[in-house]
Amino acid sequence: IHKQQALDARRAEALRGAPGVPVLVTALAASQRRSAHGRERSTECIPFDLPRTFPTLAFFHEGGPLHEDCARILEAYTFYRPDIGYVQGMNYLAAVLLLYLPAYAAFVGLCNLLNAPSVLGLYRLEPSAVQCRARVFRELCQTQLPKVARVLEEAGLTAEMFLI
């Protein structure tokens, strides 16, 4: 079933590739639709994020040597954990793992990484987990890197903006 859902999502993406449709609008619309099982339809956002994954490396561009593996790993995780689905930023984690590991090992590593209790709340977008991580980051930054903490504060950047 999950393989068929992934194939259907890819087919829908290929059909929808009509010019004139803003990428952001399409990605937002895809992320807001939910199926009966969870957030499997969030796989529709993956093709928009992959080209932005380490763009200077070109490994993850369409036709690049790791493009398909990265897309499949992210799709597989989405169907493995439909309660989470695909969340923007997972592409970087999968990409780093793929640079050093074969596809299956990278998938297992991604699952282990994202299913760790300390990280899982961030990708579930649970406000309490995000706030807790942000507080820990701020405190560590202020203690260990006070100049960096001051620059971040002066620029109005909060940890919540870049932790996920």
Image: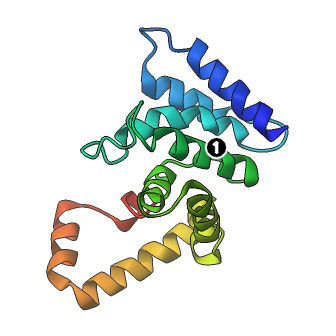
Residue at point 58%, 67% (across, down): 109
Residue at point 44%, 24% (across, down): 23
Residue at point 15%, 70% (across, down): 151
Residue 76, given in percent of the width and then of the height, sits at: 68, 48
Image side of residue 8 versus residue 51, left or right? right
Secondary structure beneath dot 1 equals helix
40 vs 146: above or below: above
Inspect this view and state whether residue 125 appears: no
10 vs 57: above or below: above
Residue 82, given in percent of the width and then of the height, sits at: 74, 49
Inspect this view and state whether residue 151 appears: yes
51 vs 87: above or below: above
Q: Quadrant of residue 64?
A: top left
Residue at point 57%, 17% (across, down): 14
Type of amino acid under label 1: Glu
Which residue is label 1 attached to? 75
**Which is nearer the eye, 79 or 99?**
99
